[in-house]
């Protein structure tokens, strides 16, 4: 027996060796030039390789029989070739054709079944990592500005961004009609949660393989609360071995960041990928303290089978970033032609109203406990997520797919907001109203030093201090598809069920302060009346939102349970024509409770005495819990047709109707909602009807995508924290978006332009243009690539818009220039230099004031000023 063992082992090894096939070859362009970095994979597996500098690849495949090799490279159409794997060596060369716009790519976002862009009847764009880096984004929201049709007011930092699509309104903030996703599932069920917007929990890093963005179209039926579109961050999965480490340092601002990622196939059909980032710094604006601290790590593990795959993944995000809110800006001229300048010494695009002298705040927590926070917390999302997905071909034309994710989400939003700006009389007037005291002869001093303050220009600050106590989510999307291709019928039917549970447990714990308007070391201001009594305490004017009428103390805890079955059908009666239609039924139960706030007297600091701020403390009334108990349901539909004119061109048309529901904005300010309430909200959801007509063309050196669109929005109204108003309008918009790419040798040009004609169609502002909606958005990115590296620019901007729906104050149009250069030191090491907003432009994205006030100061927010960074990257 022992003698037979070596013979048996030899036979087994010989058998294993005979089952392995060496696959090799080259990948070149149509001119025969090598394409280094192209991937060649056995379709549906992790078996494959990336080409070297000479365009060569080689790998060993353990599969037997017929297999499909897929060669792909950014900017070129993928190519599929059937080969026979039977041991020995298989040589297969690929010659790829240009496809700069990716019309031949198969996409997976917002559609019933994955199809190529050329065959689909929707408008979709894909951003690869190189295209993202070319726009030199400093945060995730800035990436979206390069997508046609998307209006991303990227002036807030790494969260709290207003994002919308094709003239659909930003009526209360966030991304109400647009859903942000990671790997096909939403970050949050609602995109416009006050102080908890989805973009605050989403980070771009090297784990992102590509970003897919669909505008309008079937987004109405393929996701909840996203009728205007879906932006999906799709992760790398390690099918091809490789990774990178990069470090970035700010040259003219305090910033350090390290990015890393690595993935590889291993074992029997297994592949993994892990990566993320961590950073530390002050950020693009001067704060005087470290406001960016934290990072993210993501990982996934995939098992590939002959008929599909299964994947598990995890994500941990713990990141602190500053959130920039509207601040004082001086304005002169007229509403039609305003001129902006610094208020006091406060820079418009490079400074904020916080300072090292205003770092902490003390007050009452949601349960009445004493709590101290620091402003350096800024926007502090914490997310621990795990997920799983699988997709299998069941045979006989059946395919099943399921995606699931559970996330523990929490955090904090802390940022000072200028609620009032003016001279001492204007600011002290609010204190006089609250205290009933005559403060005309009051003494003003700096809280930290006791030095006298002139009071020529002061601001009343409401500190937006919000605890995101529990934003946990559980999402699952399962679908079953049947193709009738085996019956000579080009027909496919898909049925699916999305289930989602979203918890929104948050508390608004705001305090009010008086401060100077200065760019560096702005001081909190103490006020003492002529009797020598302190009206403030270290600049604290009230435990509550004094400048908002002592409002806004609220806590609500509600659970949103959504079930949404959907059905889609695709049919091609002739090879040139693809028809599709889908319908979705959303049903949501909402349960929970909340408590409003009230003003009273409480010894907040527990010193045994009642100070003036303590005599007007706004705290949450835990003894009176109000119910949240309601449900809503609605139907959505979408139908489209795509006609292929040639192998390189097509036209399409689509009609859709979708909805977006309200979450916390239906509950504020009492923490209660049980149906049609006193706010006049008949239904807690809004409706969006859309039509689109498009043309797409692939050229030898580029591509063109043109879409005309129409959108009609019917809203029920929503609360906005900064204006303290309920905005209730209907809207209509039409326009055209154009996306184009030219790829001519070493030169590449990407461009996106969106023209929108939008109008308010109801209420007192009927006939006006919706606030902050420009007629034209544009993004142009030229670049040049050679063996030595890459250089490029991006020009991003918009035309003028109105500050508010009343159409008085005009916000001027603006354009920013970003620049980048990357030098290849070796084939694996590169040096980079990038500048965001190279010419330090000012771009006002919003203003709280509808017109220039009498004192010449508005509260507004600009894009950030110039920031220059250098990077060192090692690929392996």
Image (cartoon, helix red, strand yellow):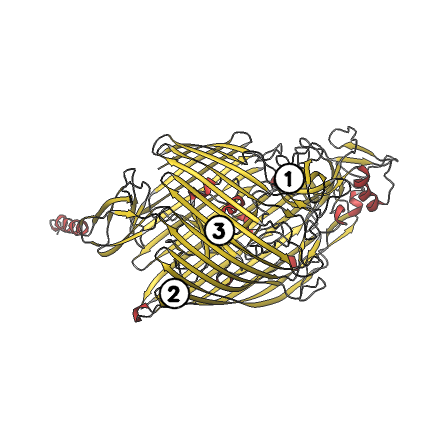
- Number of numbered discs present? 3
Instruction: Out of 437 and 495, give the one closest to the viewer.
Output: 495
Where 703 sits versus 492, above or below?
above
**Around disc 2, counting alpha carbons within 10 Å, would you say few (fewer than 14), some (14 to 19), or many (20 or more)?**
some
**Are discs 1 and 3 less than 8 Å apart at CB?**
no
Picture coordinates of residue 98 (x, y %)? 34, 47
Mark closest to the chain's N terminus, 1 or 3: 1
Q: Left or right: where does residue 254 sit relative to residue 514?
A: left
Picture coordinates of residue 26 (x, y %)? 25, 44
For the C terminus, the quadrant is top left
Cα separation between marks 1 and 3: 42 Å
Residue 592 appears anywhere in the view: yes
In terms of secondary structure, where does tag 1 sit? helix
Instruction: Out of 458 and 498, give the one closest to the viewer.
Output: 458
Q: Report which residue position mark 2 lands on.
A: 577
Q: Left or right: where does residue 150 sit relative to residue 876?
A: right
Mark closest to the chain's N terminus, 3 or 2: 2
In the rendered structure, find residue 618 and report the number of the disc placed on it.
none
Mark closest to the chain's N terminus, 2 or 1: 1
Cα separation between marks 2 and 1: 58 Å
Q: Report which residue position mark 1 lands on.
A: 375
Q: Report which residue position mark 3 lands on.
A: 738
Picture coordinates of residue 587 (x, y %)? 55, 67
**Are discs 2 and 1 less than 8 Å apart at CB?**
no
Instruction: Out of 876 and 375, give the one closest to the viewer.
Output: 876
């Amino acid at each position: 027996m022992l003698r037979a063992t070596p013979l048996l082992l030899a036979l087994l090894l010989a058998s294993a060796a005979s089952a392995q096939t060496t696959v090799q070859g080259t990948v070149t362009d149509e001119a025969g030039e090598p394409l280094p970095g192209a991937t060649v994979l056995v379709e549906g597996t992790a078996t494959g390789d990336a080409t070297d500098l000479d365009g060569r690849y080689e790998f060993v495949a353990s599969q037997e029989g017929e297999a499909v090799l897929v060669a792909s490279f950014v900017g070129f159409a993928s190519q599929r070739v059937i080969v026979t794997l039977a041991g020995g060596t298989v040589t297969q060369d690929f010659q790829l054709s240009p496809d700069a716009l990716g019309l031949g790519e198969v996409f997976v976002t917002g559609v019933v079944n994955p199809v190529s862009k050329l065959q689909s009847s929707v408008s979709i764009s894909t951003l690869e990592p190189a295209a993202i880096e070319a726009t030199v984004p400093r945060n995730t929201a800035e990436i979206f500005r390069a997508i046609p049709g998307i209006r991303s007011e990227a002036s807030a930092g790494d969260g709290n961004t207003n994002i919308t699509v094709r003239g659909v309104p930003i009526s209360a903030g966030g991304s109400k009609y647009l859903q942000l996703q990671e790997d096909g599932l939403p970050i949050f069920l609602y995109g416009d949660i006050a102080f908890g917007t989805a973009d605050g929990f989403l980070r771009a890093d090297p784990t992102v393989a590509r970003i897919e963005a669909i505008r309008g179209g079937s987004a109405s039926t393929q996701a909840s609360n996203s009728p205007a579109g879906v932006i999906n961050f799709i992760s790398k999965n390690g099918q091809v071995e490789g990774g990178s480490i990069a470090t970035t340092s700010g040259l003219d601002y305090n910033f350090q960041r390290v990015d890393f990622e690595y993935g590889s196939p291993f074992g029997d059909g297994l592949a993994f990928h892990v990566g993320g980032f961590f950073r530390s710094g002050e950020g693009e604006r001067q704060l005087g303290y470290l406001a960016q601290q934290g990072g993210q790590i993501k990982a996934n593990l995939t098992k590939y089978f002959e008929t599909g795959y299964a994947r598990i993944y995890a994500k941990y995000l713990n990141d602190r970033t500053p959130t920039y809110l509207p601040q004082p800006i001086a304005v002169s001229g007229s509403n039609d032609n305003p001129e902006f300048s610094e208020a006091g010494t406060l820079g418009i695009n490079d400074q904020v109203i916080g300072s090292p002298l205003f770092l902490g705040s003390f007050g009452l927590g949601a349960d009445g406990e004493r709590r101290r926070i620091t402003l350096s917390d800024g926007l502090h999302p914490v997310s621990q997520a795990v997920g799983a997905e699988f997709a299998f071909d069941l045979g006989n034309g059946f395919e099943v797919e399921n995606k699931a994710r559970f996330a523990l989400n929490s955090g904090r939003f802390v940022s000072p907001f200028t609620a009032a700006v003016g001279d001492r009389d204007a600011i002290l007037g609010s204190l006089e109203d609250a205290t009933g005291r005559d403060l005309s002869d009051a003494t003003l001093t700096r809280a930290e030093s006791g030095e006298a303050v002139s009071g020529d220009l002061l601001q009343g600050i409401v500190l937006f201090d919000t605890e995101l106590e529990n934003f946990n989510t559980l999402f699952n999307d399962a679908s079953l598809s049947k193709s009738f291709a085996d019956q000579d019928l080009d027909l496919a039917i898909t049925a699916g069920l999305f289930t989602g549970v979203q918890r929104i447990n948050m508390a608004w714990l705001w305090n009010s302060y008086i401060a100077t308007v200065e760019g560096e070391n702005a001081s909190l201001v103490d006020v003492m009346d002529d009797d020598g009594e302190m009206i403030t305490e270290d600049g604290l004017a009230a435990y509550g939102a004094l400048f908002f009428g002592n409002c806004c103390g609220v806590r609500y805890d509600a659970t949103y349970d959504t079930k949404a079955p959907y059905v889609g059908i695709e049919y091609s009666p002739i090879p040139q024509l693809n028809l599709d239609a889908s319908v979705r039924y959303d049903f949501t139960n909402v349960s929970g409770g909340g408590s409003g706030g009230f003003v009273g007297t409480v010894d907040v600091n527990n010193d045994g005495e009642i100070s003036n701020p303590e005599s007007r403390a706004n705290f949450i009334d835990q003894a009176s819990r109000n119910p949240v108990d309601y449900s809503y349901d609605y139907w959505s539909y979408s139908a489209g047709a795509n006609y292929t004119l040639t192998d390189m061109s097509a036209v399409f048309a689509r009609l859709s109707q979708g909805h977006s529901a309200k979450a916390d904005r239906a509950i504020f300010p009492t923490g209660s909602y049980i149906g049609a309430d006193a706010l006049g909200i008949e239904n807690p959801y809004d409706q969006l009807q859309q039509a689109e007509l498009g043309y797409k063309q692939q050229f030898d050196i580029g591509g063109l995508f043109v879409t005309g669109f129409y959108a009609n929005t019917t809203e029920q109204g929503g609360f906005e924290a900064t204006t303290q108003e309920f905005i209730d309008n209907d809207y209509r918009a039409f326009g055209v978006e154009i996306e184009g790419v030219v790829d001519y040798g070493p030169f590449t040009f990407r461009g996106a332009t969106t023209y929108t004609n939008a109008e308010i169609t109801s209420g007192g502002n009927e006939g006006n243009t919706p606030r902050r909606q420009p007629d034209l958005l544009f993004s142009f990115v030229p670049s040049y690539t050679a063996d030595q590296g890459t250089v490029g620019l991006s020009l991003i901007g918009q035309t003028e818009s109105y500050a508010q729906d009343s159409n008085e104050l005009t916000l001027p149009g603006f354009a920013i220039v970003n620049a980048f250069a990357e030098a290849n030191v070796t084939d694996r090491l590169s040096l980079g230099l990038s500048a965001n907003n190279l010419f330090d432009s000012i771009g006002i994205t919003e203003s709280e004031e509808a017109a220039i006030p009498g004192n010449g100061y508005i509260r507004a927010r600009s894009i950030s000023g110039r920031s220059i960074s250098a990077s060192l990257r090692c690929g392996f």
